[in-house]
Image (spheres, grey):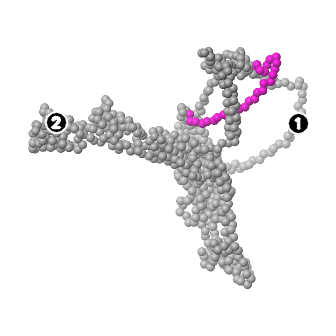
Amino acid sequence: MIEGYFNRYDPNKGYDKHLFRAGKGLQSAELNEIQDQALGRIQGIADAVFNDGDVIDGADCIINAETGETTLAKGKLYLRGAVRHIAAAQLQIPTTGTVQIGVWLLEKVVTELEDPSLLDPAPGTRNYQEPGAARLQTLLEWGLETDDKPGDFYPVYTVINGVLIQHAPPPQLDAVTTALARYDRESNGSFIVQGLSTVFVESLNDGSQVFSLSEGKAHVNGFEVQLEASIRLIYAQDADLQEIVSEPHRFNADANGTMVIALNHTPIAQIANIDITAEKTVTMTHGSYSGAKDTLPDATVLEIIKITQGSTTYQQGTDFKLTADTVDWSLSGSEPAGGSTYEVTYQYRTTIQPLEQSATEVIIEGAVEDSLVLIDYTYKLPRIDRLTLDADGVVRRIKGLSSRYTPQPPAIPAGQMPLCQIVHDWLRDPQVINDGIKVIPMHALENMQQMIADLYDLMAIERLKNDATAQSPAAQRGVFVDPFFDDDMRDQGVEQTAAIVGGELVLPIEVEVVDLLETAKVSLPHYELEPIIEQTAKTGEMKINPYAAFDPMPARCELILDVDHFVETRTQWLSPMTRTMVQGWGFQTRVVGSSTRTEVLNRTTQTQQFLRPKTVRFKLQGFGAGERLDSLEFDGIQITPQEVSA
């Protein structure tokens, strides 16, 4: 390290302490060994409690997700067996991808040459102003893992697409956190505490798909992970492809001579080849000798339709025959004169490109009517992907097993928590199924227990009703009978002007309750108010900021949302009111026990199928004099204001 420095400390030798002996000289190496031995013991205990990079105090991280400007506050971090101070800093980080923010630790040896204050400060001694021990200086600096700096890097924060992944708040006792995580993992597994719902946003022009993962908190593998803001996730449309070779179709043209062919397997990824039977007429020149073979322009000739020269039509099989891709005039019939021209109409196989192409169809032309069309293409197989979250707050997409008919979602790797399923059929926007396991609060468990008890009560009541119905059936020989138990057998579509009370059909009673305390105030004719408790003291006031030394208020942004109101109409009959009045009034008044209990029997959340798209309007105000609006973005999308005033 430096000249004259000796240190023989070796933890593997198991030396527990130094035993100094009288009359023996004190070695500088022994002092260095004692120092390293003490530091090693302290670090061994501290490492069992903390990890390198744990935040002890302060060191807050604030990120601007739009620009990547990052502010890191001063604080205390645990590094290499000690709690070390670090100053504040400003960083510029990428707003896409995963970024590790941490500290760079550099060790530096300082002697009296760099720091003259290390010379012996004791006057009147032989060693006054003489060199002594050097110092090992530890320098800390905020930075990114990708920075090219000297020293060792220790990660502190993880940022994904400009969003800070927050773990357990400081101070983080690693041993305690690990023990709690093991208990949480073994008893509860991984689960979502709140939020962390995924929705599909849009498809970009390059084919990528954009998803949004909302903010929230989860326990992953026993460790707490919290997203302070939503994350924008972008994935490519990397569908698995299946090849189809020579899919057959019959060509039947429409009035325009074209045909729309719906392929058997969709959506189409790429059309590789379309093989059709075409027909054309060409002018040929006969050979210079009798019985010559004239080569046709195409090598894939299927059949010669006809050959004419002027008004003469030659007969196939008598005058000529098709040999490979030539017109063979070796037969004994007639043939054109040598060097003369004639017209040949023939059919041949050729490949073409579609006029138009969609995800399910192609449009072609030029084929012979009722001929065979063979199409080679690849199509996208359906697939079910999963989004998962690990203990470090990293969101991963795991591809499923593609299949033509039964795609299967992937298995969840150990140490990761499922967030949602993404179902791709590649014909429309992907369907997101948020199937992550969410924690059930205690009040929901209590309601569930009450629902189970109510279910047993309903089963008992239903058995009694079935027994009563069996003894006195409601329908005998085509005659409808209402036992007047309740209103469930009455016609829901007709206004009912009677009430069922105690198994009888009676006239209904409509009442209006008047509260005397609300309509009239009753008091003694003469009274005087006397104070019971008085508060005669009063509070003073002082200006907190008498010099008004503060920054101007920033501009205010107001979101104006369109709200839809739904009206649900239900029919209310008078049986319950009449039953209460009959039982509560009369010559013999009896008290009928009553109670009111509000229960949540079931709660579900689903996307409204026919809900119209909503328009989000912005209102920006509060700009200072001379301020000008340069740009306006919402979730990374540029927006042009419709109206701008001074």
Q: Position of residue 199 (x, y in %)?
A: 55, 41
Magenta segment includes 219: no
Write the residue at 33% across / 34% down: 259
Foreground of the two, 103 or 481: 481
Residue beneath disc 1: 532
Left or right of 157 in this view: 127? right
Q: Position of residue 167 (x, y in %)?
A: 63, 52
Write the residue at 62% across / 54% down: 61
Foreground of the two, 93 or 321: 321
Residue 433 falls in image quadrant = top right
Quadrant for the N terminus, please: bottom right
Magenta residues span 581-608
Which kind of residue does numbered mark 2 sit on?
Gln
Left or right of 155 in this view: 270? left
Mark 2 and mark 1 lie on one chain; the one further toward the N terminus is: 2
Residue beneath disc 2: 316
Which kind of residue does numbered mark 1 sit on?
Ile
